[in-house]
Amino acid sequence: MHMTLDCLPCFLGMALKGARELFPEELERQEVLVKECATLLGTADLTGTSPELAGDMFARIKELSGVADPYAAYKRRSNERVLELLPELERMVTEAPDRLAAALTLSIAGNWIDVGAGLAEDWEEALAREAYDATVIQASPAYALFRDRLRFGTKIVILGDNAGEIGFDTVLVRVLAAKGCEVVY
């Protein structure tokens, strides 16, 4: 899918968050990094994809900072925090009338919680605000088709791309495994 003009402010926000994470007390270095990314964004080809532009931008950030992953510390903190939440997430699914729908709902929530894209960073707040409700999933024809196709030995691949997402997906993997599915994460 091609990018739109709406993608550019998001990318600039990612650059700013990365600069602040890398250089919390060095405003001049933050400014240089953000301005360099803004220059890159100003020449971006919007017929490309977001991952292509992200690759270019993070290569530039790495070049300017000497740090391969400006979000490494954030990712570590996020994974630690969401693993602390895992018992509560599992309880939510265990008590749900439709465990599969509940686990899918949590997995989806974990996917949109993305600090790089400027989305929620506080999972407890985000989950409460989102009004956790699996009935939205249950009403989808896609859910019915997915549920009906699950059989013992069904192979499922789940791609995790956000820090902390693994905790949310762990619950889904366990539900699918209990149904006899073979899950690759």
Image (cartoon, grey):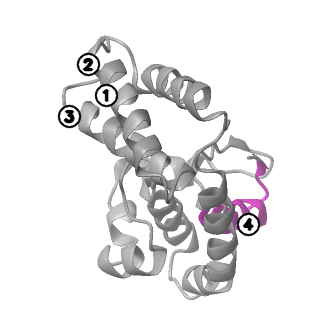
Residue 63 vs residue 56, the one in the foreground: 63
Q: In the drawing, does residue 103 fall left or right of residue 16?
A: right
Type of amino acid under label 2:
Gly
Type of amino acid under label 1:
Ala
Q: In the rendered image, which quarter is residue 10 located in?
A: top left
> Is any part of residue 86 visible from this angle?
yes
Q: Please tell me which residue is depicted at 69% across the width and 61% down the height of the picture.
A: 76
Give the mark nearer the N terminus: 1 vs 4: 1
Cβ–Cβ under 8 Å for marks 1 and 2: yes
Q: Please tell me which residue is depicted at 32% across the width and 15% down the height of the picture.
A: 44
The CA distance from mark 3 to mark 2 is 13 Å
Secondary structure at badge 2 equals helix
Which segment is the magenta one? 168-183
The residue mark sitting in front, 3 or 2, is: 2
Residue 177, x across and y down, in percent: 77, 61
Residue 16 vs residue 108, the one in the foreground: 16
Q: Which residue is mark 2?
A: 42
Q: Is residue 92 magenta?
A: no
Position of residue 29 relative to residue 77, above or below, is above
Secondary structure at badge 4 equals helix
Q: Which residue is mark 1?
A: 38
Crowd class of label 2 (few under 14; some 14 to 19; many from 20; radius 10 Å): few
Crowd class of label 1 (few under 14; some 14 to 19; many from 20; radius 10 Å): some
